[in-house]
Image (cartoon, rainbow, N blue to C red):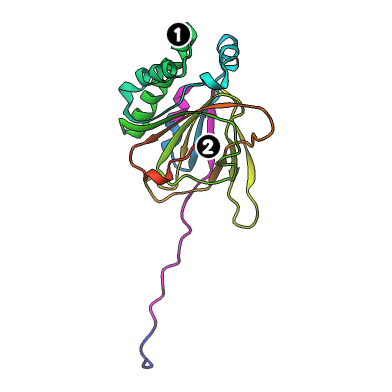
C-alpha cells in the first residue's frame, strides 16, 4: 500500500431483526397477526365449552382419533370424521363439533399461510416426546390441544438458558413461526410439549403444517 492508498471502511454489520413477541386475544382474528413484524406467535385464547370438555375427557385412549395425512383444507373435516370412525368413536353432535372445528382451523390456516395443501396430524400423546425447547424447521405451524396440558413457550437468550414465556390451555389455538419463515427476521420464541410421563395425562393434539417443509422436520409439539 502506498502513502496515498487508504483502506475503504467496511459497512457495520447489522444484527438481524428478531421475532420475539406473542400476540394474544379472545378472537380468532388475532391469528392473522402472525405476519406482523416482530411477532413470533399469535394465540387465540378461547375456552372449551363445559359440555365439549367433559365429552373429550371421557374418551378412552383406545378411541382417541388419529390422523396423519397430506390433504387439501377443504377435505379436512371429512378426514377428521373418518378418523373418528376408525377409532370407533360414536357419532353425535359433540363429535360433529370436533370435526367441524378442525375443518374451520384448517380453513383459517390456509387463508393466513396461503397454502391450501397441508400436513395434518391429530394424535393422542402420552409420552415426553419433544420435551426440549426448540424451533421447528418449517415456515409455520398451527397447534391446538383439545385435551390435556398445552404447549409451553420459552425465549431464546444468547447469554443464558431459555427464559419461560408462558403456555397454552386446552382449546386454545396458536400459529407459531418456524425457522423457515420467509423474510429476514430471526424467530427467537421456542416451544415444547409439556412433560407427561408418569402423570397419567393424555393430550389430544392437532398440528397443521403448510405442505412446503421437508418430511423429516415434521414433529408434534
Mark 2 Cα-neighbour bin, 10 Å: few <14, some 14–19, many ≥20: many
Q: Residue at horizontal 46%, vertical 6%?
A: 92
| Left or right position of 154 against 98 | right
**Label 1's element?**
loop
| Relative image position of residue 1 (x, y in whole percent) | 37, 91
In terms of image quadrants, where is residue 11? Answer: bottom left
Position above or below: 29 against 39: above
Q: Mark 2 = which residue? A: 221
Residue 138 versus residue 26 in the image, above or below = below
* Residue sitting at x 38%, y 43%: 215
Residue drawn where x is 31% and y is 33% of the image:
114
Q: Nearer the viewer, residue 17 or 154?
A: 154
Of callouts 2 and 1, the N-terminal one: 1
Q: Quadrant of residue 210?
A: top left
Q: Is residue 31 left or right of residue 192?
A: left
What is the span of residues highlighted in magenta in the rendered image?
7-31
Query: 8 or 21: nearer the eye?
Result: 21
Instruction: Please state the horizontal and vertical placement of residue 202, each as a whole percent of the image.
Output: 60, 26
- Residue 91: mark: 1
Can you see residue 181?
no
Residue with the most extreme top position: 93
Tag nearer the camera, 2 or 1? 1
Amino acid at each position: 500500500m502506498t502513502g496515498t492508498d487508504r483502506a475503504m471502511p467496511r459497512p457495520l454489520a447489522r444484527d438481524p431483526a428478531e421475532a420475539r413477541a406473542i400476540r394474544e386475544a379472545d378472537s380468532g382474528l388475532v391469528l392473522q397477526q402472525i405476519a406482523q413484524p416482530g411477532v413470533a406467535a399469535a394465540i387465540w385464547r378461547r375456552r372449551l365449552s363445559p359440555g365439549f370438555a367433559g365429552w373429550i375427557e371421557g374418551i378412552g385412549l383406545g378411541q382417541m382419533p388419529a390422523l396423519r395425512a397430506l390433504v387439501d383444507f377443504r377435505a379436512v373435516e371429512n378426514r377428521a370424521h373418518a378418523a373418528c370412525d376408525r377409532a370407533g368413536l360414536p357419532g353425535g353432535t359433540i363429535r360433529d363439533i370436533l370435526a367441524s372445528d378442525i375443518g374451520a382451523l384448517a380453513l383459517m390456516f390456509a387463508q393466513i399461510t396461503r397454502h391450501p395443501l397441508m400436513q395434518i396430524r391429530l394424535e393422542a400423546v402420552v409420552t415426553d416426546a419433544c420435551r426440549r425447547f426448540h424451533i421447528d424447521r418449517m415456515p409455520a405451524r398451527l397447534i391446538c390441544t383439545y385435551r390435556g396440558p398445552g404447549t409451553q413457550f420459552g425465549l431464546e437468550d444468547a447469554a443464558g438458558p431459555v427464559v419461560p414465556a408462558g403456555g397454552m390451555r386446552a382449546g386454545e389455538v396458536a400459529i407459531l413461526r418456524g425457522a423457515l419463515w420467509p423474510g429476514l427476521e430471526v424467530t427467537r420464541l421456542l416451544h415444547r410439549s409439556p412433560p407427561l410421563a408418569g402423570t397419567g395425562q393424555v393430550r389430544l393434539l392437532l398440528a397443521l403444517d403448510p405442505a412446503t417443509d421437508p418430511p423429516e422436520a415434521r414433529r408434534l409439539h
